[in-house]
Amino acid sequence: MALEEYRKKRKFDETPEPAGSAQKSSEQARFVVQKHLASHLHYDFRLEIDGVLASWAVPKGPSLNPRDKRLAMMTEDHPLEYADFEGVIPEGNYGAGKVMVWDQGTYEVQGKPAAEQLAEGSLKFTLKGEKLRGGFALINTGRRAADPRQQRRWLLIKERDEFADPSWNIDEQDWSVLTHRGIQEIE
């Protein structure tokens, strides 16, 4: 995993996003979920894997309800420094709009190493965040498709465990875990 695609898409003299670099992963692998009010509202789900943040855009956001199967489109890897990015990407730049750190914490992989599971198309992990907790799975649904865009299609699914919540409503969780501001208050 590398950051070339991330860097090609950004003008670092115009955006406050970190240029970053691939780094050695920390002892406790981090995850972050950023609410991103760009051309379309979505949530960016990121897992620290091999020194970068592997990333998926989740249009409806993650859910603690195991019945919800959330579309998660794999995007380019991001630098680890991006986990703390909250602010505004200026107009005219890739991803222009407001970014809020909606949740963060650490995670543990269940089974084989994360990179190996990703390559196989199914990643199981346990989140230890401020809002998201317990077991989750990312399943690649377009792995065998001929169209490269379809190959990026994954589902984010909550496992049935003590943290599952059938009444989960993401709109009731609308604040930054860093600053306690809502998305409209991000400047």
Image: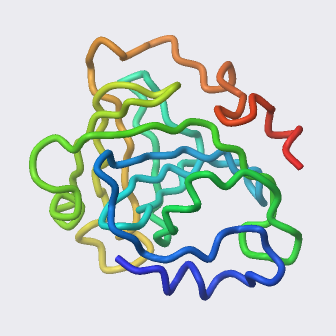
The percent coordinates of residue 57 (x first, y second) are 54, 55
The percent coordinates of residue 97 (x first, y second) are 81, 59
Seen at 73% across and 74% down, the residue is 94
The percent coordinates of residue 60 (x first, y second) are 58, 40
Q: Quadrant of the N terminus?
A: bottom left
Q: Is residue 48 above or below residue 51?
A: above
Residue situated furthest left in the rendering:
112
Colour mapping used in the image: rainbow
Left/right placement of residue 35 relative to residue 104 reads right
Left/right placement of residue 150 relative to residue 36 reads left
Task: State which quadrant residue 38 falls in.
Answer: bottom right
Left/right placement of residue 91 relative to residue 137 reads right
Left/right placement of residue 94 relative to residue 108 reads right
Seen at 37% across and 55% down, the residue is 154
Task: State which quadrant residue 68 falls in.
Answer: top left
Seen at 86% across and 77% down, the residue is 92
